[in-house]
Amino acid sequence: MKRISVLLVEDHTVVRQGLRLLIEIAGDIEIVGEAKTGREAVRMTKELRPQVIVMDIAMPLMNGLEATRQILKAFPEAKVLILSAHSDAEYVEQVMKAGARGYLIKQSSGDVLAQAVRELHKGQTYFTPSIAKRLKEEYQKSADGSRLHKRSNMELTSRETELLQLIAEGHVNKQIASELGISIKTVEKHRQHLMEKLNIHDIAGLTRFAIGTGIIESRVQSTTVQEVSPE
């Protein structure tokens, strides 16, 4: 029996190792690669072409949502299962907009995780029961049967989202230029355009926006909301 190939994306080593054990014990699923950042996930998807990608949301340099968007843009056939500690409506909405096929909270059992991988592999969707119930209720409440739309970071381009995450994580222009492979002047232009587009003109404001829309997790707020000189 050919096993389902999975790319595991999680920045915490202990959590990633635990997830590998939970997934592979199923027998019909094989972890073909592990990534610690969204950027690694994009690269490894191109190299390994896994059938299912189990993706954390909150990761440094590039979060799971942006990685999902970039992966699906390049490989529309890819199937992404988001694994997160959060079940907030805003997070779920972001996941669905990004194109992920499933969403599980990290408290889910190994059996549920394996079943979710199988369902995505078959072309189905899979959501934590409480989330599935809420999505159904929202669908029924909406007048036209469509999901409620909220103003969010989805209005930003992929490059703008990458830039915003790096700014909110406290990286200065020189570091951002190195990470994205562009010049410092280009970073400055992108930064100015981003601030004008969002009508936010300070680092603290950009950081709060990034946290509020799920681009970065609030656990990094204490180290990034202070003003940072754009060196």
Image (cartoon, rainbow, N blue to C red):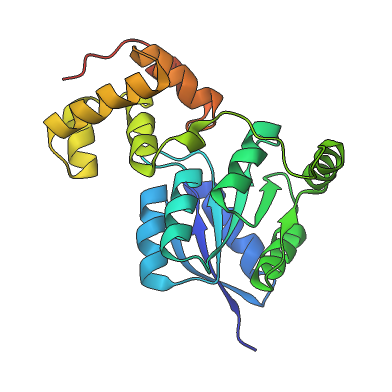
Residue 44 visible in image: yes
Residue 124, position as x, y percentages in the image = 72, 66
Marker count (numbered): 0
Q: Residue at x 55, y 72 (%)?
A: 51
Picture coordinates of residue 225 (x, y %)? 40, 14
Q: What residue appears at the point 22 percent right and 14 percent down from the top-left corner?
A: 229
Where is 112 relative to 154, above or below? Answer: below
Q: On the image, which quarter does residue 90 sit in?
A: top right
Q: Quadrant of the C terminus?
A: top left
* Residue 37 visible to an observer of this rendering: no
**Foreground of the two, 86 or 204:** 204
Indicate the position of residue 50 as horizontal and vertical percent values: 49, 71
**Vertical order, 154 against 3 (above or below):** above
Identify the image quadrant of residue 165: top left
Up-down relation of residue 219 to residue 109 (above or below): above
Residue 43, image x, y percentages: 35, 60
| Of 66 and 142, the residue lying toward us | 142
Q: Is residue 61 left or right of residue 68?
A: left
Farthest front residue in view: 144
Give me the residue at 44% from left, 58% from top: 73
